[in-house]
Image (cartoon, grey):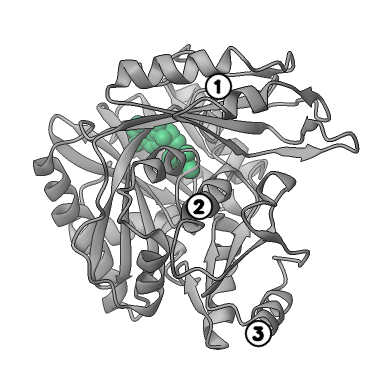
Amino acid sequence: MKVLVVGSGGREHALLWALKKSPILTGLYVAPGRAAVRNLGVLVNINIKNPIDVTRFCKRENIKLVIIGPEQPIIDGLANNLVAEGINVFAPSQAAAKLEASKSFTKMLCKQYGIPTAKYECFIDEGLAKNFILSNKIKFPLVVKANGIAAGKGVIICNRESEAFVAIDSMLVEKKFGESGEEIVIEEFLVGEEISFFVLVDGLKVVTLGCAKDYKRADESNDSQNTGGMGSYSSPSIISKDMEQKIIQRIIYPTIQALANMGTPYRGVLFAGLMICKNDPKLLEYNVRFGDPEIQSILPRFDKNCDLLKLMLSVAEGKLSSKIVELTNKTIICVVVASKGYPGNYQTGEVIKGLDEIESIPGILVFHAGTKLDKSGNWISDGGRVLNVVGEGSTLEEAKNKVYSALNFLRWPGGFFRYDIGS
Ligand code: AMP
Ligand code: GLY
């Protein structure tokens, strides 16, 4: 079976690495991809923003399944275009992708179906939003969020009235978040343990994929900037079976049922950002794709008999039959190496050395999130998040030692990473 993966980050590199193992795979293509994945899939030069180009390519090459990695093409409705042409897609429709595209939609759904989440109110009017703050119905700290997607920047935690007013003005008056900030959600600040939880959904049936911890801050301090994720780990002990059941019963099932009832069933991976508050899970947000860098630490835990491609195809065809995805008991840690300055301004075009040594270490994988090759065959930095160095162990300590020892071989003065992933 021929497969096309859409995307070019570390998440897509990890997906290609896992798909390549499938015995039913006959051809693997990636658009746009990067030089680092050229040995896993054929790089395809098509415009992924143009559904006609993507469809034409799939028909010409007889692609049987398209897997869409990033949120933007999903939210733009690429799956709808492909499905209309009879091509199987692992990604939800544009309507179902509202779970990520619109926080107010998801909050409304939570209210309607009794899904536990932070107390909230939505606004399009600055005055009403400020009056709500003054009414004290939600105590400080509270959270002001842009309704749409904002590359992880549209969430502002406010400790006092003045901060909340600045956040409201930045979204509703100054329009700093463009269309994404034309509506805002003001919600209660939840205290607890945050996890990223993943399920595969084929319309109605749900299979748990597992969970991971994401390290969102740029450095080890609690007040540094939020990023797309500076590292992750996955291990069997993050949550109990009992907690997993609570999440499925209270949060995932009602959501999937609601979308099916609306006539827009969900197909693909559903990523729930959750806060576990005193043993009760609450929904922070949904994403309609795999987490990056979370999936880089989940995929290496797949049991060798577990075929990612078969699972994804059964999701796309609405024929999910397995009850669980078999994961090993290993602990996997993924450390993101980023360009100094990220998530703000950073340099690109710097030579990165040491990757051959790192990759030759048993139990270590390197996924590329933002590199290219120069004419002399050197790896060059080409983005904010640049590398994912992934290490395994039978315990968190072991996995940490493995990954950080491997990182000693990295020779790139312009790069940085956090030293506390897995702590
Ligand atoms: P989001 O983009 O919605 O995932 O928000 C980014 C981060 O802000 C989350 O991963 C949380 O760490 C934090 N956050 C968002 N909403 C809340 C909330 N209601 N309470 C506490 N932290 C939150
Ligand atoms: N690491 C968080 C995300 O993928 O949204």
Q: Label 1 crowding class (10 Å Cα cut-off): few <14, some 14-19, many 20+?
A: many
Q: Is residue 133 visible?
A: no
Circle 3 SS class: helix
Q: Residue at x 60, y 25 (%)?
A: 337
Q: Position of residue 120 (x, y in %)?
A: 32, 45
The mark nearer the N terminus, 1 or 2, is 2
Where is residue 415 shown, x and y percent of the image?
Answer: 68, 19
Q: Which residue is mark 2?
A: 15
Query: Residue 256 or 213: which is nearer the viewer?
Result: 213
Answer whether labels 3 and 2 touch (C-beta < 8 Å): no
Q: Amino acid at mark 3?
A: Lys
Residue type at mark 2? Answer: Leu
59 in relation to 280, above or below: below
- Which residue appears at 23% of the width and 42% of the height? 282
Residue 160 vs 13, above or below: the answer is: above
Q: In this rendering, which labeled residue sits more in front, label 1 or label 2?
A: 2
Measure how far apart labels 1 and 3 are at the Cα level. 42 Å
Numbered circle sitting on residue 218 = 1
Image quarter of residue 117? top left
Q: Nearer the viewer, mark 1 or mark 3?
A: 3
Residue lying furthest left: 242
Query: What SS does tag 2 mark?
Result: helix
User: Relative to residue 380, is residue 420 depicted above or below?
Assistant: above
CA distance separating discs 1 and 2: 25 Å
Label 3 – label 2 distance at C-alpha: 22 Å
Residue that mark 3 sits on: 59
Q: Nearer the viewer, residue 110 or 169?
A: 110
Percent of width and height locating residue 246:
13, 48
Q: Which one is earlier in the sequence, the residue at label 1 or at label 3?
A: 3
* Amino acid type, mark 1: Ala
* Of callouts 3 and 2, the N-terminal one: 2
